[in-house]
Image: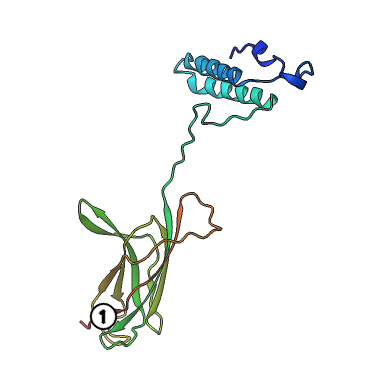
């Protein structure tokens, strides 16, 4: 890249003049930036990426030696980040029979609900299902995109044990918000949703 050093090495006004400290005025800096952009504009498409990187490294080093900082925005460079928002879900609840008695060993599975062309779809999530304990309670945790609605599916998997055979059921909830911890530095994280589901009352088959 060809930039005239006579522009860069002109003395600063005042005390810096004659002491060997090069100085850039606003006009000088704009001129150098113009030359750099003009130079990279004429690079062939085949070698553009490689040569632009070399030109950028040289230009940045040159400005650093002169004690001048420059941002990527000033050089017309945009940093692109790839990824998607993520959220942590912590979903708890209780499964009982119609009389309110807790049911143990009910399988619980969590779905995210998405809307496509006006139709809601429950999307199966890649997590191990959990089972209710002796009090009929469960806790499901997962990391996924920040769904605004979740669905809990419950299924009796042990037949006549633990109170008889019960029909499967499901329940949805949209009553939650995401709270981001101050120590969570991830740019993509929207936080955690702590969701307390209403009790699910199963009917016997």
Query: Where is residue 186 shown, x and y percent of the image?
Result: 51, 51
Residue 130 x/y as whole percent? 39, 72
Q: Is residue 82 above or below residue 182?
A: above
In the figure, residue 114 lies in which quadrant? bottom left
The residue that appears at 49% across and 49% down in the rendered structure is: 187
Residue at image position (22%, 83%) is 204
Q: Nearer the viewer, residue 185 or 107?
A: 185
Can you say which quadrant of the picture contains the C terminus? bottom left
For image coordinates 42% across by 51% down, the residue present is 85
The location of residue 25, given as percent across then percent down, is 63, 20
Q: Quadrant of residue 69?
A: top right
Q: Is residue 117 above or below residue 133?
A: above
Task: Examine the image and state in which quarter residue 151 appears.
Answer: bottom left
Q: What colour scheme governs how the chains and residues are painted in the rendered image of this protein?
A: rainbow
Quadrant that contains the N terminus: top right
Label 1 Cα crowd, 10 Å radius (few <14 / some 14-19 / many 20+): many
For the point 31% across and 83% down, the residue is 96
> Could you say where residue 84 lies in the image, as x and y percent from the top left?
41, 48
Image position of 123 (left or right of 182)? left
- Report the residue marked by disc 1: 202
On screen, residue 2 versus residue 80, left or right, reads right
């Amino acid at each position: 890249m060809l930039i005239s050093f006579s522009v860069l090495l002109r003395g600063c006004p005042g005390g810096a003049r004659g002491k060997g400290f090069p100085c850039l005025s606003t006009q000088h800096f704009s001129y150098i930036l113009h030359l750099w952009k003009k130079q990279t504009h004429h690079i062939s498409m085949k070698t553009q990426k490689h040569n632009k990187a070399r030109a950028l490294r040289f230009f940045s080093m040159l400005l650093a030696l002169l004690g001048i900082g420059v941002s990527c925005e000033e050089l017309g460079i945009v940093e692109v980040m790839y990824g998607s928002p993520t959220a942590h879900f912590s979903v708890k609840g209780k499964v009982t029979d119609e009389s309110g008695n807790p049911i143990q060993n009910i399988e619980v599975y969590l779905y995210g609900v998405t809307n496509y062309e006006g139709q809601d779809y429950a999307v199966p999530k890649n997590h191990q299902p959990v089972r209710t304990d002796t009090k009929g309670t469960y806790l499901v945790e997962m990391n996924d995109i920040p769904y605004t609605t979740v669905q809990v599916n419950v299924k009796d998997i042990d037949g006549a044990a633990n109170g008889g055979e019960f029909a499967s059921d499901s329940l949805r909830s949209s009553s939650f918000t995401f709270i981001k911890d101050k120590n969570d530095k991830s740019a993509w994280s929207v936080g955690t949703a702590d969701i307390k589901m209403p009790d699910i009352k199963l009917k016997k088959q």
